[in-house]
Image: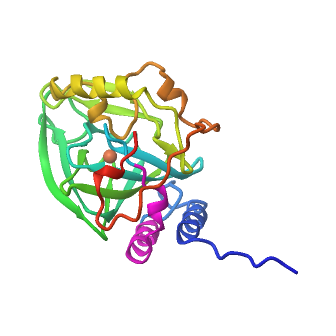
Amino acid sequence: MEAIEEPPKPMEVLVKAIHTEFENLQSDGAYGNGEIIQNLLLDYISNHNDWREYAFFCPYRYSRNLVAKSDEYELMVICWSKGQASPIHNHEGSRCWMACASGMLQETQYVYQNNKTSYGTGPLESSLVSTIDEGTVGYITDDIALHVIESIEPVSISIHLYSRPITECNIYCPTTGNITRRKLGYFTQFKEKCPQPSTAAAAAAAAAAAASSSCSNSPTCNSPTSSTSTTSSPLMQSNGASSPLANAPSPIPIPTPFTNVNMMA
Ligand SMILES: [Fe+2]
């Protein structure tokens, strides 16, 4: 008797469609048509919720949970609790789509005061504040602006697509424009938890960050990263690791409503 094949889950269908689209070379030299990609994400978050299988929260910082990756793109589910804002960051020349699946995100865009672009010197200024509402898709590139993302609901979950993948990015001090490089990591990859700093170390770092300035290169403002320095760390070594921890995380329960008590360390 032949086994009955399970139909693909909606997230699997989305990944396949994204993968196919990123094989299409565009007239501007990029792979993947931006409008098609936006519509794929919009259709997915409007009709499906199996992104919940990838929604793992970290109590100390927003969490990047990898769903799929190729040379052309990386797709992740990002879980935000209120207060877990990103620092001001760039996108290394990549395109970034942000599909809000639950909650509401606020995006604050920044440019350099001296030339109103992302490529300048000296202090930054806020150029636009907007929201990415549940069921909508935001978009950013370096040519648009730098930005900060944060949740303005107690909990938000967004699906981010980067093309190409970003392995490290700039973090900006708003008052000086000084740049710090930050390597990027994941909280989970393919539903498996990546090695993280110890709970005590993470809590101590979070406390130190809370007491420091907005220019601090601290883990509580790590975005879109799990790292806090330009040097290699155990966390950074997890980036791309293929061996998950023995104690793999469990997905949070169906979040209606989301509650922070289900966050995992
Ligand atoms: Fe970003």
Say above or below: 255 vs 76: below
Residue 239 in the image: state x and y as whole percent.
53, 34
Specify whether residue 39 is painted magenta: yes
Quadrant that contains the N terminus: bottom right
* Relative depth, front residue between 150 and 197: 197
| Magenta highlight range | 35-56
Q: Is residue 142 visible?
A: no
Closest to the observer: 168 or 222?
Answer: 222
Residue 242 location, x and y as percent? 64, 38
Say if the magenta span includes residue 13.
no
Q: Nearer the viewer, residue 13 or 244?
A: 244
Q: Residue at x 36, y 23 (%)?
A: 201
Does the image show residue 247?
yes
Q: Is residue 265 left or right of residue 175?
A: right
Q: Quadrant of the C terminus?
A: top left
The quadrant in which residue 187 appears is top left
Q: Which residue lies at the image location 26% right of the left edge and 55% below the top edge?
A: 155
Position of 106 compared to 205: left or right? left
Q: Main secondary structure of the magenta part?
A: helix
Going by the picture, which residue comes out furthest to the top? 231
In x, y percent, where is residue 137? 33, 65
10 w.r.t. 223: above or below: below
For the point 64% across and 37% down, the residue is 243
